[in-house]
Image (tube, helix red, strand yellow):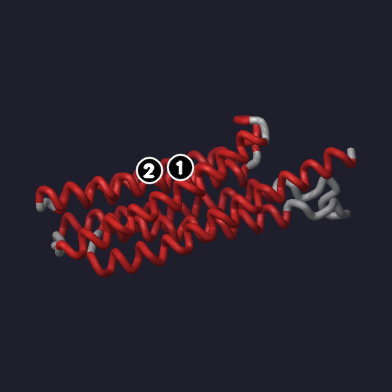
Amino acid sequence: MRARERRSRASDRRTRVTVLVALGANLLIAVAKAVGGVISGSPALLSEAAHSVADSFNEVFLLAALRRSRRPADARHPFGYGKERFFWSLLAAVGIFVMGGCFSFFQGFEALRQGTRETSRGYVVGLIVLGVALLAEGGSLLRALYQVRARGGRAALRDPALRTVVAEDGTAVLGVSLAIAGMALHMATGQVAWEASASLAIGVLLVYVAYRLGREAR
């Protein structure tokens, strides 16, 4: 029993490192995306900034889940606090939906309604920021996938904290790719509809991932 407990604690430490890596990446990327979005006026980049902010808050929820779920059993909770992981993972799913998905929809509809123009400098700034974000998010995703593999593959995804990190990082890579495509098409055609569509697609993606994570946490 003690050996199993030691393995569980060691696994939690590795998961905590994975969450911290994702948190650091998301904080840096959120600032870069927000600054780049304001400079360029890009709705897709601003949507991605909201996505990264949501992910940053969610990593804090997951750190709380890891800490609180390790508390020993007591008179009030004789079976321990392990299920708190699912509660905090549910909050993370709600955060993705509210902060990321809804803001992305707002940015997309506003771009379609009002239109937006970007300078050549704006395109360059936006694409550089998104390129750096893609590398950072990809690195974080590789770290999470490495831990999944080290813990036995798909069975490791039963841990709601690790499952949420993998889902967030995978969604982030796909979201950045959509933003790059939308901005590149806007630059090539001059039609803001491409970038607005990218924002709406990011919103749909985030809502879907939030729904899946919430259902699994339930």
Under circle 1, the secondary element is: helix
Residue 129 left/right relative to 7: left
Is residue 118 in view? no
Q: Give me the residue at 53% from left, 54% from top.
A: 22
CA–CA distance in space, label 2 to label 1: 6 Å
Q: Is residue 19 visible?
A: yes
Helix, strand or loop at mark 2: helix
For the residue marked with disc 1, what is the amino acid? Gly
- Pinpoint residue 157: horizontal percent, then vertical percent: 61, 36
* 127 is higher (above) or lower (below) than 143: below
Q: Is residue 59 left or right of residue 52?
A: right
Mark 2 — residue? 174
User: Mark 1 packing: few (<14 Cα in 10 Å), some, or many (20+)?
Assistant: some
Q: Which residue is mark 1?
A: 170
Amino acid type, mark 2: Leu
Quadrant for the N terminus in the image: top right
Task: Characterize the local packing of mark 2: few (<14), some (14-19) or many (20 or more) Cα atoms within 10 angstroms.
Answer: some
What is the x, y in percent for residue 54? 46, 58
Q: Give x and y (percent) for residue 136.
A: 45, 53
**Does 77 sit left or right of 165 as displayed?**
right
> Residue shown at 83%/54% (left/top)?
76
**Quadrant of the image occupied by residue 108:** bottom left
User: Which residue is drawn at the image coordinates 50% and 44% (left, top)?
Assistant: 141
Q: Along the line of sight, which residue is nearer the eye, 105 or 12?
A: 12
Residue closer to the observer: 55 or 95? 55
Residue 7 position, x and y percent, is 79, 41
